[in-house]
Amino acid sequence: MNTVNSKKTQNSPWPESINLSNQLFVEADQLSEAAYALLSNQPVSTQTLHEFSELKRRADNKYIEARQNWLDTKDKTNR
């Protein structure tokens, strides 16, 4: 997946950890979109379901990582 690396992100007033969290959420969204796009191919085969499940698992794990990163950053910022 492509990472978010725009000028807007690089010049952001937010701490780098928030930018990382945002990037992780974007990557999770991209993985999830790719997973559901597989299901638009008809008919859906067993192989397609396997690929969907794998991409969806990766997306879910990326969402967990992004949320944990965001919570860690929030805790550090609120101290």
Image (tube, grey):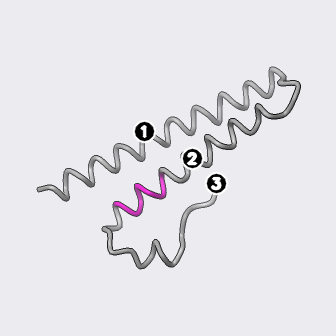
Label 2 vs 3, first from the N-terminus: 3
Q: Position of residue 57 (x, y in %)?
A: 57, 32
Residue pictured at 31% horizontal, 68% vertical? 15
Residue bearing mark 2: 29
Residue 69 lies in the magenta stretch: no
Quadrant of the snapshot with the N terminus: bottom right
The answer to whether residue 78 is left or right of residue 44 is left
Read off the magenta span. Answer: 18-24
> Residue at position x 57%, y 61% from top?
3
Which residue is tagged 3? Answer: 1
The residue at which mark 1 appears reads as 64
The Cα–Cα distance between marks 1 and 3, rounded to whole angstroms, is 17 Å
Q: Secondary structure at mark 1?
A: helix
- Please say if the residues under marks 1 and 2 sit with CB atoms less than 8 Å apart: no
Q: Main secondary structure of the magenta part?
A: helix
Q: Secondary structure at mark 3?
A: loop
Position of the C terminus, as image quadrant, is: bottom left
Disc 2 marks which amino acid? Asp
Q: Is residue 43 left or right of residue 37?
A: right
Element type at marker 2? helix
Image: 25 above or below 19: above
Q: Nearer the viewer, residue 35 or 47?
A: 35
- Mark number displayed over residue 22: none
- Above or below — where is 53 with respect to 61? above
Tell me if mark 3 has few (under 14), some (14-19) or many (20+) residues whose alpha carbon lies within 10 angstroms of its own: few
In the picture, measured across the screen, residue 79 lies left or right of residue 1, that is left
Q: Position of residue 73 (x, y in %)?
A: 27, 54
